[in-house]
Amino acid sequence: MNYDFDKVTERRGTGAMKWDALESHYGDVGLLPLWVADMDFETPPFIVDALRQRMLHPIFGYAVEPVEYWPTVVRWIHDLHGWSVDTEWLTYIPGVVKGIGMAVNVFLKEDEKVIIQPPVYHPFRLTPLGNGREVVNNPLRRNADGTYEMDFDNLEKVADEKCRMLLLSNPHNPAGIVWDKETLTRLAHFCHQRNIIVISDEIHGDMALWDNKHVPFATVSAEAEQCSITFGAPSKTFNIAGIVSSYAVVPDKDLRRRFYGWLEANGLNHPNVFAPIATIAAYSKGEAWRREMISYVEGNILFVEDYCRSHIPQIRPLRPQASFLVWLDCTALGLSQSELTKMFTEQARLALNDGSVFGSEGRGFMRLNVGCPRQLLRDAMQRLEKAVGEMIAGKR
């Protein structure tokens, strides 16, 4: 490998939420943080070099978008996902969660509703609620092997005439599902027939693992293209979340006019000076780094699976098909959610995401971030093994 993913880089004191917010979120700065969805790998050197080169100029005034900005994004999407995107379909947005909030306000009346499919990334619920819209749950159906699928029968029941938007996590967070074309086509038909806009969060789309292939929602059918707004970014893949480099892709002319017109009117479609620079560097020079990072993450996932199988069989990791997040099924421990989180934080001294924040369907689960050097992951699993052993011994 050309890049060193085993290197441990100190992040404390740098304003990193993952490390420096432990006190405010968990009340303990000594926890090992495996929660916030950024990686502990150093940002690729070609991105750092591009930013450093711009920093050499001592003026940071208003900036125009570099001419190669959107053609570079178009080329990346086409080469990686086979999706031919027109440059006019694209615009900058100041973050995916912000994009969801903006779309809610542009397209939904105050009495209209948003459908989500929990367990799912918690801003899918919190953002519409915070903007005064009702959220309708269509929980994923859990299969006997622990995997999930969409429940279209229940979707028929819960989607009334006030449902005008569906938030799609594609790939799915926290379960790491790469939705197949058949499922997405069926969802597109359902939503198109009912005039429901699909907001497809595809921020993890560049991180499909093993032989899985990410399918952009808008590509599965003409109906999907007509009812979709897709959000993407290089931020998860290249570990530059703090730069805020998100973008929207809207093929439909009417949806684009309404959404992009609102963004333009409110000055929300203009990137800061660094976002295009980082994006161009990532998408023009990053394919080798991306492949090596994914290979390392796959190794980390296999390590967690093997460790749990050999030492903590009461915890069952669901293998993700994309991204660096592992959904841990801890239900066999027989603990309440409060007991489970207490064991992780107080006994194991680990900071993971409490599964219940992703919806009631996440009770008994924890979300583990394996985007880190393996020695940190080994330390985490050893801590967890000890905590589980002590908990079981205490029940005897």
Image (cartoon, rainbow, N blue to C red):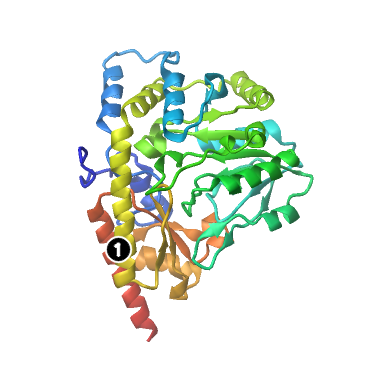
Percent x, y of residue 304: 32, 61
Query: Horizontal and vertical percent for residue 11?
Result: 27, 43
Where residue 346 sits in the image (x, y, percent)? 36, 66
Q: Is residue 172 left or right of residue 207?
A: right
* Residue at (20, 37) in percent of width and height: 2
Residue behind mark 1: 381
Classify 141 as above or below 61. below
In this view of the protein, which residue sits in the foreground, 115 or 151? 151
Residue 382 or 127: which is nearer the viewer?
382
Counting from the top left corner in percent of width and height, residue 327 is at 44, 58
Considering every residue shown, the one lying at the far bottom of the view is 396
Report helix, strand or loop for mark 1.
Answer: helix
The quadrant in which residue 77 appears is top left
Q: Crowding at label 1, few (<14), some or many (≥20) Cα neighbours within 10 Å?
A: many
Compared with 189, 283 (above or below) is: above
Quadrant where the C terminus sits is bottom left
